[in-house]
Structure formats: C-alpha cells, structure tokens
Image (cartoon, rainbow, N blue to C red):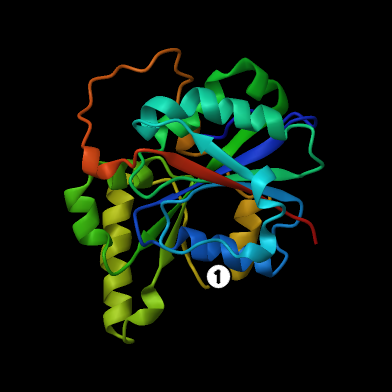
Amino acid sequence: MNGPKTRPDRRPVIVLSGFLGAGKTSLLNALLREGALARTAVIVNEFGEIGLDHLFLGKKGDNIIEMSAGCLCCTIRGELAATLIDLAPLDIDRIVIETTGLADPVPVLQAILSDREVGERFELAGLITLVDVINAPATLDAHAEARSQVSLADALVLTKADILQQGVREEAIAKLTARLRELNPLAPVIMRDNENELVRLFTGGLSKAASGKIEPARTHDHHHHHDVNRHGERITATLLRHDR
C-alpha cells in the first residue's frame, strides 16, 4: 500500500535498519563518500562496529546527540522527535536514521509518525532493511527483532553475497529470498552492488508498502523483557551533514 502523498514543504525521513553486522554503516559511508546523499543529515547510533568517516563530521562538539540511559525502544520517541525538530531549520533535502542492529524498528517509525511537530516538518519515506546473506537464516530464526526489521521493510537489500563462491552464492540468495518473501511479500529485494537502485531508494524511490501500515502510537506498552546485556548504559547518536 502506498502512503499519503508527500507535502512539498515536508522533507523525507528514511529509516535504515538491519541486524548487527549487516553493513548499514558501510553502506552509508559509501553513499556519502560518493556524493549520492548530498544535502543529507544522518542520525546514527554508535553501536556500529564501523564508525562513519570523520570526513563527514563537522565540529564534533556540535554534532553529537546523547540519548538518555535505558532501553532504546522506551527512550527514543521523545528524544528522536526533539532531534528532528532541531534539524528542521537546516538546508537539507532528507534525513537518514540508522538504527542499532538490535532494535525493533517499530518505536522509531512510531516516533516519526506520532509527533505533531515532526509531522508538520517531515514525512516518513520508509524503511530500508539490510540483510546479511551469510548469517541471515540463523539470525531470523533466533531474533524477533530481525524478523520485525524484515517484515516491516519497504525495501530489502542483500549484503555480503560477494563473499560467497559462485554457485553457492546463487543458491544462498534464492533460499534467503524465499524466506524473506514469507515474511514480507511486498518489498523489493535488491543486491548491495546495485548502486543505481540504492541511490534511487534513498532519494525518493520508496513506496511505504510495509512500513506505511504502522499506526502512530500514543503510548508504549511496557510488556517486553529488558536484557541489560543488549542495551548500553548510554545510547549515543552522531549527526552528520554532507554537502557536495
């Protein structure tokens, strides 16, 4: 299903998801380095194993946003909304939010949809989820968050297929694609090396086929279990701005 038409005065917000090690930060680095995401602000958790290039950081002191201690899904709504509102005056075309690999994307999507002030300035363009071809079968079996990341995606990007030998690669992609189709029959499946299609997704090519079904949430039912080993004491986000 397609989402509502974008108002010309609202800028798109793209959420980039994917389990740990799927290559989210590497992808952002590549697109920023090549200039494909000029005039883009990026909000990214520092849980990633690969840091974003310092080339794209301005004054570090001005570009670090620390989200308060506690579970990401419980703290993000108010602070993310405030961060987005702070970004509204900037001369940018879009915002990309990279979630931590352990995160269910629903609270992030709801944070964008539920806040009136955010809704006046920005529109959720959709959710892009990266899927590691090598580790995804086991990850999907073991982690509900990974299944949520896939089922809500508006586009699925397969990563790390190039590591596999030819023959093995084709079989792995076919099996994984079939599994992904069970979880999400609507989202297109794109290979990581399809640069033109990736740029199109980040610059207006998402249909909100799946994430458009997310309803704005007024409250958060706190019925999930907190595993202290899965959440750091402080969640840090880095704001980047890249002008071509």
Locate residue 145, reporting x and y percent.
29, 42
Locate residue 223, reporting x and y percent.
23, 20
- Which residue is painted at 66% across and 18% down in the image? 117
- Which residue is painted at 53% across and 19% down in the image? 114
Q: Is residue 152 visible?
A: yes
Which quadrant holds residue 80?
Answer: top right
Q: Vertically, is 166 above or below 179?
A: below
Left or right of residue 27: residue 87:
right
Give the residue type at disc 1: Asn
- Which residue is painted at 79% across and 30% down in the image? 9
Locate residue 160, reporting x and y percent.
39, 72
Front one among 69 and 127:
69
- The quadrant of the picture occupied by the C terminus is bottom right
Left or right of residue 165: residue 90:
right
The secondary element bearing badge 1 is classed as loop
Front one among 5 and 101:
101
- Which residue is painted at 32% across and 79% down in the image? 169
Mark 1 nearby-residue class (10 Å; few <14, some 14–19, many ≥20): few
Locate residue 28, reporting x and y percent.
57, 60
- Farthest residue toward the bottom? 166
Residue that label 1 marks: 194
Front one among 149 and 72:
72
Front one among 183 and 66:
66
Q: How many marks?
A: 1
Which quadrant holds residue 81?
Answer: top right
Q: Can residue 5 be seen in this view?
A: no
Left or right of residue 28: residue 231:
left
